[in-house]
Image: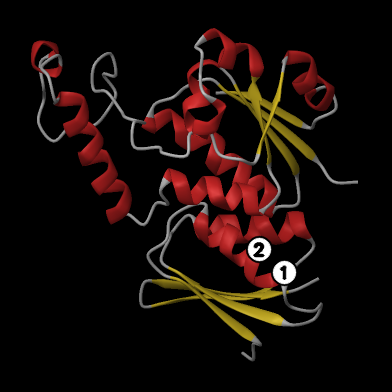
Amino acid sequence: MAKKMAIIATKGTLDMAYPPFILASTAAALGYDVQVFFTFYGLQLLRKDLSDVKVSPLANPAMPMPIPMPVMVQMLPGMESMATMMMKQKIAKHGVASLEELRDLCLEADVKFIACQMTVDLFEFDKSEFIDNVEYGGAATFLSFAGDTDICLFV
Amino acid sequence: MNFDKELNARGLSCPLPIVKTKKALSDMVPGQVLKVISTDTGSVKDMAAFAEQTGNALVAQEEVGGEFVFYMKKG
Protein backbone atom coordinates (compact mmCIF):
# COMPACT_ATOMS: atom_id res chain seq x y z
CA MET A 1 0.00 0.00 0.00
CA ALA A 2 1.52 3.30 -1.10
CA LYS A 3 2.29 5.98 1.47
CA LYS A 4 0.25 9.14 1.22
CA MET A 5 1.04 12.83 1.50
CA ALA A 6 -1.30 15.80 1.60
CA ILE A 7 -0.30 19.45 1.28
CA ILE A 8 -2.39 22.56 1.82
CA ALA A 9 -1.00 25.37 -0.34
CA THR A 10 -2.21 28.78 0.85
CA LYS A 11 0.37 31.19 -0.53
CA GLY A 12 0.51 32.71 -3.99
CA THR A 13 4.00 34.17 -4.08
CA LEU A 14 6.92 32.90 -6.13
CA ASP A 15 9.01 31.91 -3.11
CA MET A 16 6.18 30.15 -1.32
CA ALA A 17 5.01 28.36 -4.45
CA TYR A 18 8.11 26.20 -4.54
CA PRO A 19 7.78 24.07 -1.38
CA PRO A 20 4.43 22.46 -2.31
CA PHE A 21 5.44 21.68 -5.88
CA ILE A 22 8.91 20.41 -4.93
CA LEU A 23 7.62 18.19 -2.14
CA ALA A 24 4.69 16.92 -4.19
CA SER A 25 6.79 16.01 -7.25
CA THR A 26 9.46 14.37 -5.10
CA ALA A 27 7.00 12.40 -3.02
CA ALA A 28 5.31 11.19 -6.21
CA ALA A 29 8.73 10.08 -7.50
CA LEU A 30 9.19 8.14 -4.27
CA GLY A 31 5.91 6.35 -4.85
CA TYR A 32 3.65 8.40 -2.60
CA ASP A 33 0.03 9.01 -3.47
CA VAL A 34 -0.12 12.84 -3.29
CA GLN A 35 -2.86 15.44 -3.14
CA VAL A 36 -2.44 19.21 -2.91
CA PHE A 37 -5.32 21.37 -1.75
CA PHE A 38 -5.02 24.93 -3.06
CA THR A 39 -6.87 27.52 -1.04
CA PHE A 40 -6.93 31.30 -0.71
CA TYR A 41 -3.89 32.82 -2.45
CA GLY A 42 -2.55 29.37 -3.21
CA LEU A 43 -5.19 29.16 -5.93
CA GLN A 44 -3.08 31.53 -8.04
CA LEU A 45 -0.66 28.63 -8.52
CA LEU A 46 -3.27 26.82 -10.58
CA ARG A 47 -3.58 29.55 -13.20
CA LYS A 48 -2.60 28.63 -16.73
CA ASP A 49 -0.51 31.78 -16.80
CA LEU A 50 1.83 31.99 -13.82
CA SER A 51 3.50 35.24 -14.84
CA ASP A 52 1.64 37.15 -12.12
CA VAL A 53 3.17 34.98 -9.40
CA LYS A 54 5.73 37.32 -7.86
CA VAL A 55 7.98 37.73 -4.88
CA SER A 56 8.04 40.90 -2.80
CA PRO A 57 11.02 42.12 -0.80
CA LEU A 58 8.53 44.03 1.35
CA ALA A 59 7.83 42.37 4.70
CA ASN A 60 10.23 39.67 3.59
CA PRO A 61 13.34 40.66 5.55
CA ALA A 62 15.07 37.29 5.17
CA MET A 63 15.11 37.53 1.38
CA PRO A 64 18.74 37.82 0.26
CA MET A 65 19.29 41.07 -1.63
CA PRO A 66 22.42 42.08 -3.56
CA ILE A 67 22.51 45.35 -1.61
CA PRO A 68 20.72 46.26 1.62
CA MET A 69 17.49 48.02 0.71
CA PRO A 70 15.54 50.27 3.08
CA VAL A 71 11.84 49.51 3.39
CA MET A 72 11.04 52.96 1.97
CA VAL A 73 12.81 51.94 -1.24
CA GLN A 74 11.15 48.50 -1.35
CA MET A 75 7.81 50.29 -1.46
CA LEU A 76 8.57 52.08 -4.72
CA PRO A 77 6.65 51.09 -7.85
CA GLY A 78 8.37 48.39 -9.86
CA MET A 79 10.38 46.97 -6.96
CA GLU A 80 8.27 43.83 -6.82
CA SER A 81 8.74 43.17 -10.53
CA MET A 82 12.45 43.79 -10.20
CA ALA A 83 12.80 41.41 -7.25
CA THR A 84 10.79 38.82 -9.16
CA MET A 85 12.98 39.17 -12.24
CA MET A 86 16.12 38.83 -10.13
CA MET A 87 14.77 35.76 -8.35
CA LYS A 88 13.80 34.12 -11.65
CA GLN A 89 17.27 34.76 -13.06
CA LYS A 90 18.80 33.17 -9.96
CA ILE A 91 16.45 30.20 -10.27
CA ALA A 92 17.42 29.63 -13.91
CA LYS A 93 21.13 30.10 -13.22
CA HIS A 94 21.13 27.44 -10.53
CA GLY A 95 19.23 24.87 -12.55
CA VAL A 96 16.16 25.08 -10.33
CA ALA A 97 13.03 24.19 -12.25
CA SER A 98 10.45 26.83 -13.11
CA LEU A 99 7.07 26.64 -11.38
CA GLU A 100 5.45 25.59 -14.65
CA GLU A 101 7.92 22.74 -15.05
CA LEU A 102 7.46 21.50 -11.48
CA ARG A 103 3.70 21.72 -11.80
CA ASP A 104 3.81 19.72 -15.03
CA LEU A 105 6.03 17.11 -13.35
CA CYS A 106 3.47 16.81 -10.55
CA LEU A 107 0.63 16.27 -13.01
CA GLU A 108 2.65 13.80 -15.03
CA ALA A 109 3.25 11.85 -11.81
CA ASP A 110 -0.49 11.81 -11.03
CA VAL A 111 -0.40 14.28 -8.16
CA LYS A 112 -3.99 15.31 -7.61
CA PHE A 113 -4.73 19.04 -7.42
CA ILE A 114 -7.83 20.15 -5.57
CA ALA A 115 -8.97 23.76 -5.76
CA CYS A 116 -10.98 25.22 -2.90
CA GLN A 117 -14.42 25.92 -4.32
CA MET A 118 -15.22 28.39 -1.54
CA THR A 119 -12.19 30.54 -2.44
CA VAL A 120 -13.06 30.40 -6.14
CA ASP A 121 -16.51 31.76 -5.26
CA LEU A 122 -15.20 34.24 -2.69
CA PHE A 123 -12.77 35.93 -5.06
CA GLU A 124 -15.03 35.36 -8.08
CA PHE A 125 -12.30 33.58 -9.99
CA ASP A 126 -12.99 32.41 -13.50
CA LYS A 127 -12.36 28.65 -13.65
CA SER A 128 -11.38 28.93 -17.30
CA GLU A 129 -8.22 30.71 -16.14
CA PHE A 130 -7.12 27.61 -14.26
CA ILE A 131 -5.42 24.56 -15.70
CA ASP A 132 -7.70 21.68 -16.64
CA ASN A 133 -6.34 18.96 -14.36
CA VAL A 134 -7.99 20.34 -11.25
CA GLU A 135 -10.81 19.05 -9.12
CA TYR A 136 -12.97 21.47 -7.19
CA GLY A 137 -13.95 20.66 -3.64
CA GLY A 138 -14.13 21.80 -0.08
CA ALA A 139 -12.49 21.07 3.23
CA ALA A 140 -14.38 17.81 3.66
CA THR A 141 -13.16 16.57 0.27
CA PHE A 142 -9.59 17.30 1.26
CA LEU A 143 -9.93 15.80 4.72
CA SER A 144 -11.28 12.54 3.40
CA PHE A 145 -7.83 12.02 1.86
CA ALA A 146 -5.75 13.92 4.45
CA GLY A 147 -7.21 11.92 7.35
CA ASP A 148 -5.48 8.84 6.10
CA THR A 149 -2.06 10.25 5.15
CA ASP A 150 1.43 9.61 6.46
CA ILE A 151 2.47 13.23 5.93
CA CYS A 152 0.24 16.30 5.98
CA LEU A 153 1.69 19.77 5.53
CA PHE A 154 0.36 23.31 5.60
CA VAL A 155 2.31 25.75 3.44
CA MET B 1 30.60 -0.45 -14.50
CA ASN B 2 28.08 -1.64 -17.06
CA PHE B 3 24.81 0.18 -17.45
CA ASP B 4 21.79 0.04 -19.74
CA LYS B 5 20.81 3.69 -19.85
CA GLU B 6 22.36 7.02 -18.98
CA LEU B 7 20.69 10.11 -17.52
CA ASN B 8 22.43 13.45 -17.81
CA ALA B 9 21.24 15.51 -14.83
CA ARG B 10 24.14 17.97 -14.94
CA GLY B 11 23.22 21.50 -13.92
CA LEU B 12 19.87 20.48 -12.43
CA SER B 13 18.89 21.21 -8.85
CA CYS B 14 16.60 19.45 -6.38
CA PRO B 15 14.20 17.84 -7.01
CA LEU B 16 14.93 17.38 -10.72
CA PRO B 17 17.70 14.74 -10.49
CA ILE B 18 15.39 12.54 -8.38
CA VAL B 19 12.26 13.14 -10.43
CA LYS B 20 14.12 12.50 -13.69
CA THR B 21 15.74 9.38 -12.24
CA LYS B 22 12.31 8.05 -11.38
CA LYS B 23 11.08 8.82 -14.90
CA ALA B 24 14.11 7.21 -16.52
CA LEU B 25 13.66 4.05 -14.43
CA SER B 26 9.99 3.76 -15.30
CA ASP B 27 10.58 2.36 -18.78
CA MET B 28 13.36 -0.01 -17.72
CA VAL B 29 12.98 -3.60 -16.55
CA PRO B 30 14.05 -4.94 -13.12
CA GLY B 31 17.75 -5.74 -13.03
CA GLN B 32 18.73 -3.07 -15.54
CA VAL B 33 21.13 -0.36 -14.41
CA LEU B 34 20.66 3.37 -14.86
CA LYS B 35 23.71 5.62 -14.77
CA VAL B 36 22.94 9.13 -13.48
CA ILE B 37 25.37 12.02 -13.70
CA SER B 38 24.58 14.96 -11.44
CA THR B 39 26.34 18.15 -10.36
CA ASP B 40 23.96 18.76 -7.47
CA THR B 41 25.75 18.10 -4.16
CA GLY B 42 22.41 17.41 -2.50
CA SER B 43 21.86 14.46 -4.81
CA VAL B 44 24.43 12.37 -2.92
CA LYS B 45 22.13 11.96 0.06
CA ASP B 46 18.96 12.20 -2.02
CA MET B 47 19.87 9.34 -4.36
CA ALA B 48 20.54 7.06 -1.38
CA ALA B 49 17.22 8.11 0.16
CA PHE B 50 15.46 7.55 -3.16
CA ALA B 51 16.89 4.03 -3.47
CA GLU B 52 15.96 3.17 0.10
CA GLN B 53 12.37 4.28 -0.31
CA THR B 54 11.67 2.90 -3.77
CA GLY B 55 13.19 -0.57 -3.66
CA ASN B 56 15.81 0.24 -6.29
CA ALA B 57 19.44 -0.45 -5.45
CA LEU B 58 22.19 2.15 -5.53
CA VAL B 59 24.88 -0.34 -6.51
CA ALA B 60 27.75 2.11 -6.94
CA GLN B 61 28.54 5.79 -6.81
CA GLU B 62 31.61 7.91 -7.42
CA GLU B 63 32.73 11.50 -7.66
CA VAL B 64 34.56 12.32 -10.84
CA GLY B 65 35.90 15.83 -11.38
CA GLY B 66 33.19 17.52 -9.35
CA GLU B 67 30.42 15.40 -10.85
CA PHE B 68 28.50 12.74 -9.01
CA VAL B 69 27.88 9.47 -10.78
CA PHE B 70 25.30 6.98 -9.56
CA TYR B 71 24.47 3.48 -10.73
CA MET B 72 20.88 2.66 -9.87
CA LYS B 73 19.69 -0.90 -10.39
CA LYS B 74 15.98 -1.15 -10.95
CA GLY B 75 14.29 -3.30 -8.31
Which one is nearer the viewer's eye here, B69 or B20? B20
Q: Residues within 10 Å of mark 2 (few under 14, many from 20)?
A: many
Q: What residue do we see at 29% from left, 19% from top? A: A60
**Vertical comparison of A63 with B15: above or below:** above
**Vertical comparison of A26 with B73: above or below:** above
Secondary element at tag 2: helix
Q: Quadrant of residue A68?
A: top left
Q: Where is residue A149 drawn, in percent x and y?
A: 80, 30
Chain letter, disc 1 residue: B
Give yes or no for contact between labels 2 and 1 (Cβ–Cβ under 8 Å): yes
Which residue is labeled 1 in the image? B26
Chain letter, disc 2 residue: B
Do dots 2 and 1 share one subunit?
yes
Which one is nearer the viewer's eye here, A40 or A59? A40
Q: What residue do we see at 28% from left, 13% from top? A: A59
Q: Residue furthest top?
A: A122
Q: What residue do we see at 27% from left, 27% from top? A: A63
Which one is nearer the viewer's eye here, A118 or A55? A118
Q: Amino acid at mark 1?
A: Ser
Q: Which mark is residue B56?
A: none
Q: Is residue A128 left or right of residue B51?
A: left
Q: Where is residue A137 drawn, in percent x and y?
A: 72, 21
- The quadrant of the image that shows the C terminus of chain A is top right
Secondary element at tag 1: helix
**Vertical comparison of A85 with B1: above or below:** above
Q: Which mark is residue B22?
A: 2
* Cα gap from disc 2 to disc 1, whole angstroms: 6 Å
Q: What residue do we see at 70% from left, 61% from top? A: B51
Describe the colour scheme in one phrase: secondary structure
Q: Is residue A8 left or right of residue A123?
A: right
Q: Is residue A109 left or right of residue A124?
A: right
Q: Residue furthest bottom?
A: B2
